[in-house]
Image: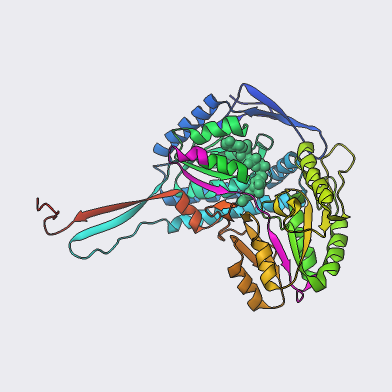
Amino acid sequence: MAIATKDYGLFIAGESVEAEEIRELAEPATGAALGRAAMASPEDVDRAVEAARAALEGPWAKTPPNERSRLIHALADAIVANRKELTELETRNVGKAVTSVKGEVAVSAEYFRWYASAIATIAGRAVPMGGSVLTYTLKEPVGVVAQIVPWNYPFMMTSWKLAPALAAGCTVVLKPDPATPLSALRLAELAVEVGIPPGVINVVPGDGPTTGSHLVTHRGVDKVAFTGSTRTGSEIMRLCAEPVKRVSLELGGKSPNIFFADADLDAAIPSSVYAVYYAAGQSCDARSRVFVEKPLYDEVVSRFSETASRMKMGDPLDEETQMGSLISQAHREKVHGFVEAGLEEGVELVTGGHPLDGDGAFYPATVLANVDNTMSVAQEEIFGPVVSVIPFEDEAEAVKLANDVQYGLVATVWTGDPARGHRLARQIKAGTIGINCPNTAFPGLPFGGYKQSGFGRENALETLEMYLETKSVLTWTGAKPVNPWGL
Ligand code: NAD
């Protein structure tokens, strides 16, 4: 059933459908009403899984790879054509700076394009056996996939998840966070508009413990791909254990950013400010632990704080804004709670550290100095604009401190010595290492975690393997088959 503007239904079998539960959404930056979104019940999830199964075994199975590739390119074109609408929707829904969201929407189209081309790499192989055995392998889609994404990059995380699944020939039931379902719903509509068959992409917003766990445990779901916190990821892995469901997890981080005394600070400081405060620190790859070789410590603390305090915070839709609001007042309280705990443990507050007055969930760029790596502010994922600056003596200690954390998502090293950069790249236990480079994700480059940051890789050829089964086929072409019984 069609719904009116500002009312957002579930998206099942190519249609926007109503649900019993409707939730009011508000803009986190202003508190203004944003719309009413339907939340999926377990029965709605059942209908979405059925639709995904029907599409998997029906039209999508009959769509040859070159046609899948064309459709994925067409979806990328539709993202570009609708980028203004998608950017505004996402900016209002998440509260992040529009300049950031613009980039996220643009690069999301590129992820689809990259996978549209990567379809050409999906192929089995003949395995030489000698004698008269002929063998080959087939690559088949893993089936119906449940994809669960968080609120921090709703559109980009949805794109990271959907693109490889579509390329592999899977169908999807995607569960966005209940607070940020809008851009995923619009993307699913665009997919149908460009000709991707109804039922290939279904979107069922709802709460984790109800809608999410029903989806994860559904017998019609063959694989679960999750992005979110380590705590939820661990619960999802437990839910997938009993039915031996395929699962991949992209989880949290507490990533190090290491400044050696020979670093080019003019490049390192602004890049590192960007690397932690991008999306107001609500990024899995936020470099929130800054380690500084002792002779540079005071200079880095002072220049980092000075740059951070100049960041322009305000209306997310203003092109001048560098940092928007946090996702909600409740999340801001959580972030501030970490800062207060740090202050009780004796850290020094250099800049920021206080919630701002007004309706929005704004929290300033915050720098904590004199932090010990064992403190909660250095060990736990704050998921807000808070950085801990920690001194180190030498290279060995830098590596030890960087690795001394439960996470292993990304790390950045700033040094004038390229050999040292590559040495650390091998010694740091993380999925992505930047040497004099704050960026972490590009289409084609594997992204994912060591340790409790999860397993599986996104954005790359490795990802396709997570959405494919490999089947071995063999036959005798000559002499009679033999077996130990001589039969
Ligand atoms: P979260 O774990 O609370 O929620 C993530 C998603 O899981 C939401 O859609 C939520 O509704 C759902 N969920 C919660 N409980 C569930 C359950 N029992 N069964 C099924 N689904 C359930 O995480 P969050 O706070 O929304 O997101 C922030 C986290 O995501 C951070 O830890 C961040 O580091 C991580 N993250 C990781 C990556 C990455 O690529 N590694 C990218 C973005 C965010």
Left or right: 52 as drawn, with respect to 188: left
The image's colouring method is rainbow
Left or right: 225 as drawn, with respect to 64: right
Q: How many marks?
A: 0
Query: Is residue 249 found inside the magenta-colored segment of the image?
Result: yes
Left or right: 379 as drawn, with respect to 226: right
Query: What is the magenta range?
Result: 238-265
> What residue is rendered at 55% in x and 33% in y?
213
Left or right: 272 as drawn, with respect to 250: right
Residue 44, by quadrant, is top right
Residue 346 can be seen, yes or no: yes
Q: Position of residue 229 (x, y in %)?
A: 63, 45
Most foreground residue, 253 or 27: 253
Q: Position of residue 206 (x, y in %)?
A: 62, 31
Most foreground residue, 101 or 478: 478
Residue 56, by quadrant, is top left
> What residue is rendered at 43% in x and 33% in y?
54
Q: Position of residue 406 (x, y in %)?
A: 63, 54
Residue found at the far left of this picture? 487
Q: Position of residue 414 (x, y in %)?
A: 72, 70
Q: Give the answer, above or below, for where 115 lies relative to 219.
A: below
